Amino acid sequence: MNDKKKQFLILVRCCICMGCSFGIITNCLGIFFSPIAAQLGVGRGDVALMSTIMSLSSAAAIQVIAKLLNRRFPINILMGAGAVLAIASVVIMSMAKSIMVFYVCGALLGIGYSCYANLPVSILLRSWYGEKNASKLGIAMAFSGLCAAIANPIMGRFISTGGFESGFRVMAIMLIVLSLPATFTMKLKEEPAAEGTAASGKDGKAVTGTVIAASTMLLLVLNAAAISTETGMNSHFSSAAISLGYTLAFSATVASFQNVFNSVWKLLYGFFIEKIGLVKSTVLYLCINMAGSALILGLNKVPAAFIAGVSMYATAFGISTVGCTIMLQKIAKERYAEVYATMNLVQTLGYAFFTWAYGSISDKAGNYLPCLIIAIAASACCAVVFTMLGRKAEKTA
């Protein structure tokens, strides 16, 4: 089998991994909240806490995953074990009768899907496609939204007829059929020192790589904080529509457009990066994001304008997943996994905080307009910081 065919098969597997992790698991979990709450007799907020626990356990797990990858732990075993853990957690959830079981399974699920999500996938794509992996990363990341768009209605139908238990069984079957074959057959192109990870020393410990200046780390943290400030607003647009007097049906339409354009922007982003460069592509996306916010601020009573604004705002997740990943590859080089883990923690905590903060601010203000102003300021800040990071990346090239 020639290298091009091997590259293509790795890309297909990476798409499947992103579809199973963020698509089938995280992007579909929300449809289970109300059915679980109704059947267990608890509040939806109590059930939604499972999702928060999952995100926090994922951020913690990535710190360990990065260390394992730096020490040349077999990537297929790591990803496969994560897939098995995720499937086992979903199966247990299909039989759970206590909210505490969902909390424990949420933590295990976060650990499981992290083993075959962003970090391992980006390392694999860089290993097989080298520096020109942006378009392939964009394709893989886009599959999270595409799989969610397909899986949500399927599981929703089973939930409506057989309860949340039936929905989780369908999720488990999907994960077994898709994730197990994809994860256990993964392989880095070069052994023992694939691009994107640190080589191993004679004592089995990771070799220290590129030295990153404190000023660069500060910029990376500021960038991660700014990005999480933007992405934290994404989950509120459906509620914002209702607060403006729109119907529940319109709110659902807004969510659909948001998910579709989330994937579209990610798909296009990688190609833009390879055509006009990382910084120019990111600044372009940030301008689209700010224009979307301005459109919602100025014309929020016009349904088409509101949908268009939300669709434009969806560039934020493309920047968060594709743009920041490529920038970290350029700056961190062989320390990529280690630095990615740190930045992921900042983004996860920032996202959790701002998702809560925007809800609190909107409650006090009576609307989401102050939140959009904060988001515009964050986008402007991100444009400046990302440009500065781009200059530092050029110096270390």
Image (cartoon, rainbow, N blue to C red):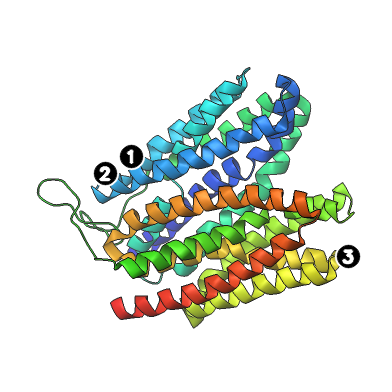
The residue closer to the viewer here, 225 or 161, is: 225
Give the residue at x 60% y 19%. Answer: 95
Instruction: Evaluate if marks 1 and 2 touch, with contact meaning CB atoms under 8 Å apart.
Output: yes
Amino acid carrying mark 3 in the image: Lys
Q: Position of residue 352 (x, y in %)?
A: 57, 47
Tell me the distance, in whole angstroms, between the alpha carbons under discs 1 and 2. Answer: 8 Å
Q: What element does badge 2 sit on?
A: loop
Residue ID for mark 1:
77
Give the residue at x 82% y 55%. Answer: 241
Amino acid carrying mark 1 in the image: Ile
Q: Which residue is most to the left?
A: 202
* Quadrant hosting residue 29: top right
Say the numbered circle drawn on residue 301. 3
Amino acid carrying mark 2 in the image: Phe
Give the left or right position of residue 337, taking residue 106 as reference.
left
Give the left or right position of residue 213, taking residue 160 as reference.
left
> Which corner quadrant holds the N terminus?
bottom left
Q: What element does badge 3 sit on?
A: loop
Give the residue at x 29% y 76%. Answer: 396
Residue ID for mark 2:
73
Q: Position of residue 236 (x, y in %)?
A: 71, 52
